[in-house]
Structure formats: C-alpha cells, structure tokens
Image: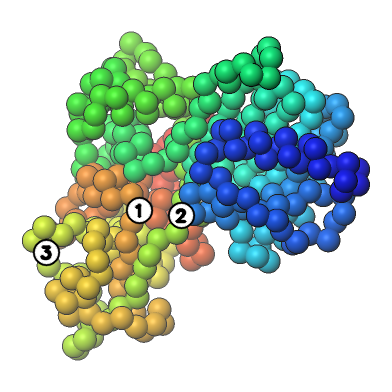
C-alpha cells in the first residue's frame, strides 16, 4: 500500500485515537525508512511514543501476530534512537474478540513491555500502555456514524492510590514486620475505602477496574486477588519505565561504615529506606547490596541539610535520594527498623526490579519464595 492509498485509513486511526485519548497530540515522524509502514509520533501524559500502524484488509490471526511481531522489533529499535516508547497498532475493517484475545495473550507472553493496540472501522478500540498502566477497551460503535460511542474504559491501573489499595489486599497475610498497613479482612469495596482511608467512590472505581481484568474476585472469605503472577508482571513492567527523580549524595564530614547511624527523623517530612537495603533489613537480601537508597517525599534540600549531605557523583555517593511519584503507596505501609522507617517488602521488590545490579533476581525471590504468589486462585 503506497503512501497516498494509506492517507484515508491513517486519518481514521488518528480519529479513533483522539476519541478515546483526549490528551493525545500528534506529530509526523521520519524515524523509519520503511515505505510500507505508517509512522507518526504521539505525546500523551508526558510520554513520547513512536507509532507504527499495520493495515489489514481482513484479519487472519497468524498473519496479524506475525506482522505485529516484525513491527515490534522494528519500532523498538527506531524508538530507542529518538528516546521514545514503541507503540504498534493493527487496523482492519473488523477485528473480532477472538483476535483481540489472541493478541492480548501473545503480547503478555512475548512483549509485555511494549504498548499496542487494535482498531477497526466499526469503532472498536483496544489499547494497552504498560508503562503508564493504562488500558482502553471500547467495543464497536453500532448503527449510524452519529451513534453515541459506548463507554470507553480508560484507567491508569497502577496509580498511587490503586497501588495502596492493592497492597492492602495483597499483604494482609504478609509475614509480621514486612507490612505496616492495614490487615483487616475486606469483603466490599466500600469497606476497602474505609480501611484504606480513601473515598468510597475511589475504592469502587479501583475494584471495578481490577475486577474487569480478572485480578479481583468476591468470595465468601472477602475480596481476593487472583492471577497474582500476571498482576505482578504488569506492575513490575510499569515500574521498569517509571522515572524517579534521584540525587546521589555523600556525607560532608568523616565517612562511616554504617550510614544508617547518621539518619534521624525530620519533623513533618516523610522518608523511607528502600531498595536493596530495605531487603537486607527485612532479612531477605538475596544478593550483594549496592548501597543505600532512600525515598523522600519533598524537596531534596531539607534532607541534604538535616543529614549533612552534599550532592556528588554516583561513584562517590554514600546514599541516593529518590523522590517518588507515588508517595501514599510508598509511605503509608512502612515498618520500623532501628527506629527508622523502611518500605514494605512488596515496595522493596518494586524498587529493585528496574536496577541492573541483580534487581530482577532479588524481586523474583521476594515474589516467588517469600510471598509465594502464583497464578493459582
């Protein structure tokens, strides 16, 4: 299909994206030399994506998956060159539920870090952005062109309060000392809101979003998290792409073999020891700790002054301060060690997962061997 013949479906794809993603912005891209691919870039929620759309006159599932596979490899390479994220899309006259399910399964198993979507002429839109924890699933618009679209589901799954509510459900039976949050049995979203100190409306939106994706189930024993491995894979994938502000720092005065001795509480300032050091304090360190990392809530300057620190290179650092985008889920469930706040053990696993220093090994040790979570209900 030459460029001129592609203009009409390209415009249709952009129109569908605009309908379900109101904050999207488009711009042309010249990142790909492939004349048979449609490339443009989008900006959404401060994320940059390089988009490649594959067009199909009819859907054959194996052909669809094969074409998207090639598109994934190409788009990942090209997106990296322009510091963007890859987004691969398939567009056809009609895309059925079976095709959507097969692509969902394929992407989950083989490319769970890549954003993807399927769209058709009838108005069906299925989009998944793992780095943002964002899902959109709109069924086809039936009837005339002016018919009102059915309700779109656009949810940032791993928002701050969603993370907090998930932890309440996941960590109720965690070993003593590994979770400082509520441990009440929760059997309704309303009660979950009260236990988690969030609005009832927020708790119901959370429950609906995760129940729709078959991660939550109502039982006689209360609300249960199911498919835990798949849930954690999705959460860990989001964490890999989560950008944290950080500052390496060193002590101004004489060095110390135990940096924890230098840390004291600050009035009205939340912080928590995180990462590999948190794993060590929890007694589950499975590798060598590369150093001390501390999550702080507010500006770094107050902590630099209080702890007599100065900014430096990573090589010379005694401590790395990080500022979290998700403070409630990080700080509400902390536990105390040596009179210092430490993140809960699940947060420690999330913290180390993106790190190259055997972070994946440590995170999987916590998930599989400490919590013993699996896909068994």
Q: Secondary structure at mark 1?
A: loop
Place of residue 271 in the rendered image (x, y in percent of width and height, measured from the top left): 22, 59
To which residue does mark 2 refer?
A: 242
Q: Is residue 77 visible?
A: no
- Labels 2 and 1 touching (C-beta < 8 A): yes
Q: Secondary structure at mark 2?
A: loop
As measured in the structure, the alpha-carbon distance from the residue carrying label 2 to the one carrying label 1 is 9 Å
Q: Earlier in the sequence, mark 3 or mark 2?
A: 2
Q: Earlier in the sequence, mark 3 or mark 1?
A: 3
Frontmost residue, 2 versus 292: 2
Q: Is residue 30 visible?
A: yes
Q: Is residue 372 above or below residue 149?
A: below
To which residue does mark 3 refer?
A: 266
Q: Is residue 127 above or below residue 303?
A: above
Residue in view at x 64 percent, y 19 percent: 146
Mark sitting on residue 325: 1
């Amino acid at each position: 299909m030459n460029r001129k013949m592609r203009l009409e479906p390209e415009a249709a794809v952009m129109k569908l994206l605009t309908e379900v993603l109101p904050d999207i912005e488009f711009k042309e891209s010249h990142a790909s030399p492939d004349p048979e691919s449609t490339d443009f870039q989008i900006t959404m929620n401060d994320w940059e994506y390089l988009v490649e759309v594959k067009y199909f006159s009819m859907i054959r599932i194996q052909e669809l998956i094969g074409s998207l596979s090639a598109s994934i490899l190409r788009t990942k390479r090209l997106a990296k060159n322009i510091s963007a994220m890859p987004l691969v899309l398939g567009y056809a006259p009609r895309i059925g539920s079976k095709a959507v399910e097969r692509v969902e399964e394929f992407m989950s198993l083989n490319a769970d870090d890549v954003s993807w979507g399927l769209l058709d002429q009838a108005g069906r839109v299925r989009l998944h952005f793992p780095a943002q924890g964002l899902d959109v699933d709109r069924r086809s618009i039936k009837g005339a062109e002016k018919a009102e679209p059915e309700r779109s589901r656009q949810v940032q799954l791993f928002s701050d309060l969603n993370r907090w509510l998930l932890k309440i459900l996941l960590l109720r039976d965690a070993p003593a000392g590994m979770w400082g949050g509520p441990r009440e049995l929760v059997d309704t979203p309303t009660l979950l809101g009260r236990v988690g100190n969030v609005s009832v409306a927020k708790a119901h939106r959370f429950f609906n979003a995760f129940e729709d994706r078959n991660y939550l189930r109502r039982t006689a024993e209360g609300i249960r998290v199911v498919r835990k491995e798949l849930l954690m894979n999705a959460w860990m994938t989001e964490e890999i792409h989560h950008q944290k502000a950080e500052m390496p720092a060193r002590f101004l005065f004489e060095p110390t073999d135990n940096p924890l001795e230098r840390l004291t509480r600050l009035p009205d300032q939340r912080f928590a020891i995180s990462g590999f050091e948190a794993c060590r304090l929890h007694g589950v360190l499975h590798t060598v700790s590369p150093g001390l990392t501390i999550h702080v809530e507010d500006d770094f300057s107050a902590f630099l002054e209080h702890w007599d620190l100065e900014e430096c290179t990573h090589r010379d650092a005694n401590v790395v301060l990080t500022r979290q985008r998700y403070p409630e889920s990080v700080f509400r469930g902390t536990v105390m060690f040596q009179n210092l706040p430490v993140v809960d053990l699940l947060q420690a696993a999330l913290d180390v997962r993106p790190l190259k220093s055997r972070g994946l090994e440590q995170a999987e040790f916590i998930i599989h061997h400490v919590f013993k979570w699996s896909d068994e209900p």
